[in-house]
Amino acid sequence: MGRVAGRVCIVTGAAQGIGRAIGEALLDEGARVCFADINGDKVAQVAAANRARLNGQGGNVTSAAVDVTDRAQVKAMIAHTVDTLGPLDVVFNNAGVNKPMNFLDVTEGNWNFIMGVNGLGCLIGMQEAARQMIAQGRGGKIVNTASVASRQGFDNVAPYCASKWAVVSLTQSGARDLAKHNITVTGFAPGVVATEMWEQVDNDLMQIGAAERPGQAMEAFSAEILRGSVAQPSDITGTTTFLASRDSDYMTGQIVMIDGGMTLV
Ligand code: NAD
């Protein structure tokens, strides 16, 4: 029996990277999973690939196209999941974006874009998941993706850091408010994970003159990882499945660092 057998889970930002890995690890431990992403075609392919991987047990997997900043779309994602897979147990608010800019050059547009997806998207995801769980009357779990950038401010990515600090405070506020409904709210904070986000960040840093060659920024960020290397998405999923499982029922309001010892706070 898997650690999350039969649990109905939604993972946003699941077309690639950490989100995809979270969803696949949940499936491997018996969950029913909705992979959700703004890139609807790509996330549908992820769901199809997993259906094939599970030898056609398609009832365990679905997908949804969603912009997490759009409340109506988030509601529709939840309704689709419940209709297709059953009552909602766990939501991972994982979708996130970054767009490095030198500190003095940060614009309102850059701020609003990043805070919109990472901050407001997290809030809307928490609210709509909680409304569904309250209506069902059997509690639930909300898990938010924070970052080492939730613990320290870094230059060139100030709005990203602010948005990930927002994820921590939303986790704490949500935990306090939703405890009476038997809903726990936790989060996890990766350090440097080898995903397409880092390829894009590396390119962006070169474009603003903060790095000279591909990989330089990732190496610089990674220099102080005690475990000696950057993470792969699979390094994250043991913890995320734990946070979706009953083993973590007594935890709420906490952020678990999964950064190889990069930040000791
Ligand atoms: P990624 O860029 O590879 O994947 C992010 C996914 O989110 C993409 O599939 C994208 O289409 C989707 N997305 C973007 N905007 C969306 C929106 N408005 N609505 C729905 N989906 C949207 O990134 P990743 O590295 O897998 O990161 C996943 C999460 O982990 C993010 O919240 C990120 O900030 C966080 N994180 C990543 C790292 C890292 O080193 N990669 C470190 C710490 C935290």
Image (tube, rainbow, N blue to C red):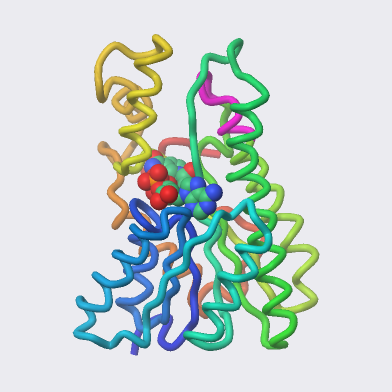
How far across and how far down the image is residue 204, in percent? 39, 23
Q: With 119 as the anchor, is 224 left or right in this view?
A: left
Instruction: State yes or no: residue 256 in magenta.
Output: no
Q: Which percent across, then down, holds residue 113?
A: 60, 35
The residue lying at 46 percent from left, 63 percent from top is: 36
Q: 219 or 92, which is in the foreground?
A: 92
Residue 135 position within the rendered picture, expressed as x and y whole percent measured from the top left: 74, 84
Q: In this view, does 154 lie above or below 37?
A: above
- Camera sees residue 134: yes
Picture quadrant of residue 93: bottom right
Magenta-drawn stretch contains 158: yes
Q: What stretch is highlighted in magenta?
A: 154-162
Foreground residue among 75 and 182: 75
Give the residue furthest to the front. 41
Look at the image and tell me whether residue 258 can be seen: no
Asked whether, in this view, residue 175 is left or right of residue 200, the answer is right
Position of residue 47 relative to residue 196, above or below, is below
- For the N terminus, give its image quadrant: bottom left
Between 140 and 41, which is closer to the camera in this rendering? 41
Q: Which residue is drawn at 33% across and 37% down?
A: 226
